[in-house]
Image: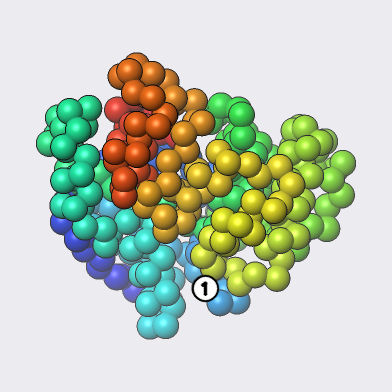
């Protein structure tokens, strides 16, 4: 085992990150406690057991190998996962200028974007979470992992690979997950799209994902926030965000005033609502 220390660039609201991890954990794939998360990360052709403990200064990762090349890849993934390199001074300057956010920014200056650990997993899980509650989405995820995942170390399971899901007929996916035929078809298409992509790689281009069956604007915007590098995406059709905007008398077009950090505005609105979607 090796340990890697990763410091945040400025304040880090690690409690908020822990709350997001707990709310969105995939049963069997991830183990989340009050300190951090344990799961497998794919680097090259291998899976590595990684535990990430979060604190106000950043993260401490424990990795199951002494290979420094793996350490570098895992460190990059974790820094991006928890947005540790973001310049929050610049972000907070924009949002604190709006009375809607001023107090929240003052109280929680270290609120960062908690992204997801793996792009393929995130796309599949986001598809399964379309137009359902977070609890329902997690149930679909758990069924997927139980049926098509594989046993891994430390009692964890590996998320199904694109090839393994592509080999499952759409009707079987629908029946096993107990989702609509359209949703099962989208999962199947996503698997086919990712089957030749590098495991653990970045989120594909928005235009490529938009060409897939069943992936619309909400999914693309949500993925841009939770799995991409676009810090100015805003899932305007998200139910929680629409409710928050309405409660504050803000029209959807008014979010332009939060450019170029609308993704951080979305994260703050989710936090202010009490929701972790």
Tell me the quadrant of the picture where the C terminus can be found.
Answer: top left
Indicate the position of residue 15 as horizontal and vertical percent values.
27, 41
Residue 183 seen by the camera? yes
Indicate the position of residue 243 as horizontal and vertical percent values.
42, 20
Residue 14 vertical position relative to residue 159 in the rendered view, above or below:
above
Q: How many marks?
A: 1
Identify the residue at image location x=60%, y=36%.
129
What kind of colouring is applied to the model shown? Answer: rainbow
Tell me the quadrant of the picture where the N terminus can be found.
Answer: bottom left
* Image quarter of residue 218: top right
Indicate the position of residue 166 as horizontal and vertical percent values.
79, 57
Is 174 positioned to the left or the right of 68 in the image?
right
The outermost residue toward the left is: 106
Label 1, secondary structure: give it: strand
Indicate the position of residue 191 as horizontal and vertical percent values.
72, 57
Residue 38 seen by the camera? no
Identify the residue at image location x=51%, y=48%.
223
Residue 259 vertical position relative to residue 87 in the rendered view, above or below:
above
Residue 272 vertical position relative to residue 263 in the rendered view, above or below:
above
* Image quarter of residue 241: top left
Q: Nearer the viewer, residue 35 or 16?
A: 16
Q: Nearer the viewer, residue 161 or 202?
A: 202
Identify the residue at image location x=69%, y=40%.
143
Label 1 crowd (10 A; few <14 / some 14-19 / many >=20)? some
Is 224 positioned to the left or the right of 34 in the image?
right
Is 181 positioned to the left or the right of 53 in the image?
right
The residue beneath circle 1 is 43
Is 183 positioned to the left or the right of 251 in the image?
right
Identify the residue at image location x=22%, y=40%.
95
């Amino acid at each position: 085992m090796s340990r890697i220390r990763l410091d945040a660039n400025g304040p880090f609201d690690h409690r908020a990150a822990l709350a997001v991890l707990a709310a969105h954990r995939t049963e069997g794939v991830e183990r989340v406690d009050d300190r951090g998360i344990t799961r497998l990360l794919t680097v090259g052709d291998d899976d590595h057991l990684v535990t990430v403990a979060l604190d106000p200064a950043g993260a401490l990762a424990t990795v199951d190998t002494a290979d420094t090349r793996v350490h570098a890849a895992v460190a990059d993934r974790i820094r991006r996962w928890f947005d540790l390199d973001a310049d929050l001074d610049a972000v907070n300057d924009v949002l604190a200028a709006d009375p809607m956010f001023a107090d929240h920014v003052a109280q929680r200056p270290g609120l960062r974007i908690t992204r997801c650990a793996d792009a393929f997993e995130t796309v599949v899980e986001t598809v399964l979470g379309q137009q359902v509650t977070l609890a329902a989405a997690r149930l679909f995820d758990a069924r997927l992992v139980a049926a098509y995942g594989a046993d891994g170390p430390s009692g964890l399971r590996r998320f199904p690979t694109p090839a393994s899901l592509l080999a499952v007929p759409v009707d079987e996916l629908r029946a096993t997950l107990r989702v609509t035929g359209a949703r099962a078809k989208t999962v199947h298409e996503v698997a086919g799209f990712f089957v030749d992509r590098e495991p653990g790689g970045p989120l594909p281009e928005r235009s490529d994902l938009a060409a897939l069956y069943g992936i619309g604007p909400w999914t693309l915007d949500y993925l841009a926030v939770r799995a991409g590098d676009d810090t100015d995406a805003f899932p305007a059709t998200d139910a929680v965000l629409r409710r928050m905007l309405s409660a504050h008398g803000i029209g959807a077009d008014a979010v332009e005033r939060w450019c170029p950090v609308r993704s951080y505005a979305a994260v703050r609105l989710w936090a202010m609502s009490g929701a972790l979607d």
